[in-house]
Structure formats: structure tokens, C-alpha cells
């Protein structure tokens, strides 16, 4: 495959419902996206990843698909999608779609048929099991909602759902299902899309006989039996063949993926994915999921960065991200809302200069922060609600709500803050979800005017990156590894260097540059303060030196 172009690109992720409403019904849509394509291009990104745009009952906001070959009426139609796609291409941007094939919606016609009887053309499209000694087929929990099994009276059987009840898992062992997947891929590739972000793709092959998991692990107890399952490489190589017919690339989401298993997908002659999203660096203030909190520790974050930079170097290509639609806002967790501009710009530097393909999530580029709603009933995300109602039940309401404030996926799903007018300029109608009340301070229009803003800083970094061979291809070396305040790394390529210095401290820090740098004549290329001082780093200061 000659698709290596993705290595020098950067992407912008759109979660359309909250991006921009083009027709005034309070819901973001493809009319809105069309109007904002120039804005996206102005960030100096080279492509767009669309979270699902397909028809969906929205039990999991698009990740429960009821028709793979259409656009949700809330967002437009296929014609409008083609318009967006063509205009994005004209602007020199690639477009990748979300491919969600571990499960469908329970309202997908395949499932509607499948649940009717044990012998119809779709009866084996999903994972159906009889009760075992009057109990559930196994002890797996769902990651989103109670147990992983739901009873269906028509079939007198249970179906498996690793995610919400309305997300039944497809039976990928059925060759017909795999043919369907390939057809869906061709449908979008024929239209001209440039690749796929493949949702929880490492979960699609389940272990034979679906053995019980360890009973004391909540939520993820079945994971050893559905993550990196027995036939995953076979199935993915079938899908790979489709992609080889086009000039496209595949990016797989791998929750809890290790470098070792990621390399098996991305490297060698059996390469089936070009890129992967891992979660390691998202655990610096939590365990397994953001709901289970622990204090942020910089050394933990650095260790995750270092591991992936080192172990993939020369073997596979990294993805770089700090936010997406599944995580709370990064300033609110790894930075500081008090030092909003400072920490927002520092966080940009901290990841954009590593080796890999960067992703910027909508709103991240202006430093949007977590929303704090005063009741769990105001939250809409199925997993946040489930966490609240299943864990730490003895804690006070205030304590549990604080956990939701820190962890909810809803924080990344509030409407994009375009300006300081009503509803943050997101819609002329009534927004479908709460707008973060800080929109008068944090919005695109104001940041456009301010050369020091987070927005303009992202533009600067993304532009620099594109033109710098060292930033694109350089090796990664880290300094001050044990520091809980400083993150310092060097990129090196053909005898040229970049030195990246990030302070994660809200206080001034005394600091001495590394020896190698002092011996050569370096130049400060980027800094998030106007007058950087020698020997001192201001709160959340970030610098990029070249030498
Ligand atoms: C992925 C998606 C997430 C979704 C889940 C189930 O992790 O990113 O939003 O809820 O898969 O499809
Ligand atoms: Ca709309």
C-alpha cells in the first residue's frame, strides 16, 4: 500500500452533533460543517475524522448504527455529505469515517430480523446463547450497562452486548457478516472517503465458548476473552484486502492495547492496521476509566508517552491525541483551568511535537473545559449514568457528582463555543445539550483576535510541525525523567534537533537546560510566553528550541 501520506498529516476530529448547527434546529449538522471547512483548514490540519454520521437511535450517540449506508436525518443526507467531502478534498483535506462494526444498534434491520427466530437468514448475525443452568450464558459484565447479556423472549435466548443493551455484538465468525462489513467499506471508499477509524476493532473476535471471566473484576471481566481474540488477525486481513483496492488507511481503536499487541497489528508482513489509538496516556489521573480517579502524576503520563515513542520507533507509527469524544477535557485534568491559556498551550506543545500523526478534537483548539452540571439527571451519556448508579453507592451525592464532573464523556460533547453571543453561536435555535457557561470567555471569535490565544498557538504548532523534518521524523529522547514538574524531550533527525520543554507546574520553576543544548547555539522557535527568562520557567511554560 502506498498510503504513507498519513504519517505527515494531522487530523481534526468532529463529533457532529455539537460542532455547528447550519439549519437552526439546535443540532450540529453537515450544513454547519460545510460552513466551517475553511476554519478547520485554517488550523493547519490535513484531514477530518468524523465520529459516526449514520442513522442511529443515539443510545450511544451514533456508535449504535441502524443503517451503515446513509446519513442521520439530524445531520443531513448523502448529497450533503458528498458536498462536504468534495469541498474538503478541494481544500486539500482527507476525510475518514468511523467504522463501527463490533456491534450495531438493536434497531438495525439485521437485529430486528435476527431476534425473530433461531432460523432466519440473519439469525447468526449476532451472538446468541441459551441460558446456562437457568442463569446467564456467562458472567461477563457489559462495559456500559449491567451484565453483558440481554434476554429475548421471541428466541428464548440471550444476546451478547459488550457495550449498552442497545448495542448487540455482531457475530464476526459468520462469513456473511464479514462480507457485509467489506461491502460497507467499499460503499464509502467508492464515494471517495480516505480511510476509517475502526471502533473497538480489537474486540471483534470472541474466544471460543465464551469462558467466564474473573468474578472480582467489575465491567471488564470478559475482556481477556474478547480483546485480541483468536481470529482477529484473519478477519482484519480480509478487511485489509478491501483497503488495498483503494488509496486509504486504517486506524484501529484499541482500548487497553499494549505496545506489544499493537505492533502485531501494525508491523510486519501481516500488517492489518496503519495506526492505532491506545489509552495508556489517558490513565495519568485514573485507573482503567476516568471514573475511577487518582491524583494526576506527571511521571505516569511521561512513562506512557515514552513507552510508545520508543517501542514503535522504526517499526510502526504513533497516533498522538489528548482529547476525543470519550474523554473529559484535558485542561481540566492534566492542566489547570486557572492557568487556562498557559496550560492549554503547554499541553499542545507537550504532544504535538512527538513522533506520530496528531489528532485535535473539536474545542480542544480553543481550550474548552469540563462542564459541571448540578444533577446526574442532566447528564446524557450512557456510561456516565451507569457509573454513577453502579459504583461508590455509599458515597454522598456530592462526592459521586464530583466524580462525574471529573470524568464524564459529556464534557467533550457540549456545543462548540464559536462566539460570545447566545448559545455560544452554536445555533440560532435551542441547543440540544447544555452549553458550557464559560463560553463568554472561551470561544473561537475572541481567540481569533488574540495572537496569544490557544487557538492561534495550535495553528502555529501545527504549521511548524508540517514544515519541520525533525518534528515529523525525528527520534525521541527524554530528559529529567523523574521530575514531577518538567517534561523535556528531544527529537533528532539527520544531526538536527528540537528540544521541547514543558512545565506542568502552577509555580515558577528554576531550570537549567541540558548540556548538549548549552554547548550548541540554539534558537527558541516557539514559546507560550512573550518574554521567556533564562533559568526560569513560568507557570505551565512551554518552549520549543531548534539547534
Ligand atoms: C468506542 C467509541 C465510544 C463508544 C464505544 C462503543 O470506544 O469511541 O464512543 O461508546 O466504542 O461503540
Ligand atoms: Ca441542525
Image (tube, helix red, strand yellow):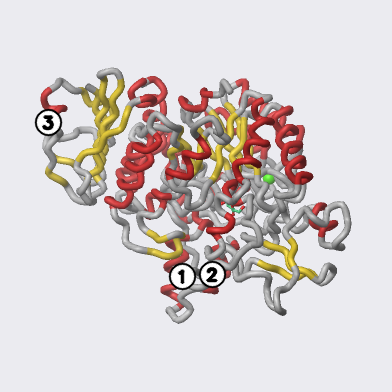
Q: Which of 193 and 372 is in front in this view?
A: 193
The residue that mark 1 highlights is 401
Estimate the x, y position of residue 225 in percent, counting from the top left.
57, 58
Tag 1 near tag 2, CB within 8 Å: yes
Element assignment for label 3: helix
Residue 341 in sight here:
yes
Instruction: Indicate the quadrant containing the N terminus: top left, top right, bottom left or bottom right.
Output: top right
Label 3: which residue? 515
Q: Residue at x 39, y 60 (%)?
A: 286
Q: In which quarter of the image is residue 502?
A: top left
Q: Is residue 65 left or right of residue 370?
A: right
Which tag is nearer the camera, tag 3 or tag 1? 3
Q: In this view, does 165 lie above or below 79?
A: below
Q: Distance between the residues labelled 2 and 3?
A: 52 Å
In the shown orientation, is residue 147 left or right of residue 475? right
In this figure, which residue is indicated by the disc labeled 2?
376
Local packing at callout 3 (Cα closer than 10 Å; few below 14, some 14-19, many 20+) is few
User: Which quadrant would residue 84 be assigned to in this image?
Assistant: top right
Looking at the rendered structure, the secondary structure element under dot 2 is helix
Amino acid at each position: 500500500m502506498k498510503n504513507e501520506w498519513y504519517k505527515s498529516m494531522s487530523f481534526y476530529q468532529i463529533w457532529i452533533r455539537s460542532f455547528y448547527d447550519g439549519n437552526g434546529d439546535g443540532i450540529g449538522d453537515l450544513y454547519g460543517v460545510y460552513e466551517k471547512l475553511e476554519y478547520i483548514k485554517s488550523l493547519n490540519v490535513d484531514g477530518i475524522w468524523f465520529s459516526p454520521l449514520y442513522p442511529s437511535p443515539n443510545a450511544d450517540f451514533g456508535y449504535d448504527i441502524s443503517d451503515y449506508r446513509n446519513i442521520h436525518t439530524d445531520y443531513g443526507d448523502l448529497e450533503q455529505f458528498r458536498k462536504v467531502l468534495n469541498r474538503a478534498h478541494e481544500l486539500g483535506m482527507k476525510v475518514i469515517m468511523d467504522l463501527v462494526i463490533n456491534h450495531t444498534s438493536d434497531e438495525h434491520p439485521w437485529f430486528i430480523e435476527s431476534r425473530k427466530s433461531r432460523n432466519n437468514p440473519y439469525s447468526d448475525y449476532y451472538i446468541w446463547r441459551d441460558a446456562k443452568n437457568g442463569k446467564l450464558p456467562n458472567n461477563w459484565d457489559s462495559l456500559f450497562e449491567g451484565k453483558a447479556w440481554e434476554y429475548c423472549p421471541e428466541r428464548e435466548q440471550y444476546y451478547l452486548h459488550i457495550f449498552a443493551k442497545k448495542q448487540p455484538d455482531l457475530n464476526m465468525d459468520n462469513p456473511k457478516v464479514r462480507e457485509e462489513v467489506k461491502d460497507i467499506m467499499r460503499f464509502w471508499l467508492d464515494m471517495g472517503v480516505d480511510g476509517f477509524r475502526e471502533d473497538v476493532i480489537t474486540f471483534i473476535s470472541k474466544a471460543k465458548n465464551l469462558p467466564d471471566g474473573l468474578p472480582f473484576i467489575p465491567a471488564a471481566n470478559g475482556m481477556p476473552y474478547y480483546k485480541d481474540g483468536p481470529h482477529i488477525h484473519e478477519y482484519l486481513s480480509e478487511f485489509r484486502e478491501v483497503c488495498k483496492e483503494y488509496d486509504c488507511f486504517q486506524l484501529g481503536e484499541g482500548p487497553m492495547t499494549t505496545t506489544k499487541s499493537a505492533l502485531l497489528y501494525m508491523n510486519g508482513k501481516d500488517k492489518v492496521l496503519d495506526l492505532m489509538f491506545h489509552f495508556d496516556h489517558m490513565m495519568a489521573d485514573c485507573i482503567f476509566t476516568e471514573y475511577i480517579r487518582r491524583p494526576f502524576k506527571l511521571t505516569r503520563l511521561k512513562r506512557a508517552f515514552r513507552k510508545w515513542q520508543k517501542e514503535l520507533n522504526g517499526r510502526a507509527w504513533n497516533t498522538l491525541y489528548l482529547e476525543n469524544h470519550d474523554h473529559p477535557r484535558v485542561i481540566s485534568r492534566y492542566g489547570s483551568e486557572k492557568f487556562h491559556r498557559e496550560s492549554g498551550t503547554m499541553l499542545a506543545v507537550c504532544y504535538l511535537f512527538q513522533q506520530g500523526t496528531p489528532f485535535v478534537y473539536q474545542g480542544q483548539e480553543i481550550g474548552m473545559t469540563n462542564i459541571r452540571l448540578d444533577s446526574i439527571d442532566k447528564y446524557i451519556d450512557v456510561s456516565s449514568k451507569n457509573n454513577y448508579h453502579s459504583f461508590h453507592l455509599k458515597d454522598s451525592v456530592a462526592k459521586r457528582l464530583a466524580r462525574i464532573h471529573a470524568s464524564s464523556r459529556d464534557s467533550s460533547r457540549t456545543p462548540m463555543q464559536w462566539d460570545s453571543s447566545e448559545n455560544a453561536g452554536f445555533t440560532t435555535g435551542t441547543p440540544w445539550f447544555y452549553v458550557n457557561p464559560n463560553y463568554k470567555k472561551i470561544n473561537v471569535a475572541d481567540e481569533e483576535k488574540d495572537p496569544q490565544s490557544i487557538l492561534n498557538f495550535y495553528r502555529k504548532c501545527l504549521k511548524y510541525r508540517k514544515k519541520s523534518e525533525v518534528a515529523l521524523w525525528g527520534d525521541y529522547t527524554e530528559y529529567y525523567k523523574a521530575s514531577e514538574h518538567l517534561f523535556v524531550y528531544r527529537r533528532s533527525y539527520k544531526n538536527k534537533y528540537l528540544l521541547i520543554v514543558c512545565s506542568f507546574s502552577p509555580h515558577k520553576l528554576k531550570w537549567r537546560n541540558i548540556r548538549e543544548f548549552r554547548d550548541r547555539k540554539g534558537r527558541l522557535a516557539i514559546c507560550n510566553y512573550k518574554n521567556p527568562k533564562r533559568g526560569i520557567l513560568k507557570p505551565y511554560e512551554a518552549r520549543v528550541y531548534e539547534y
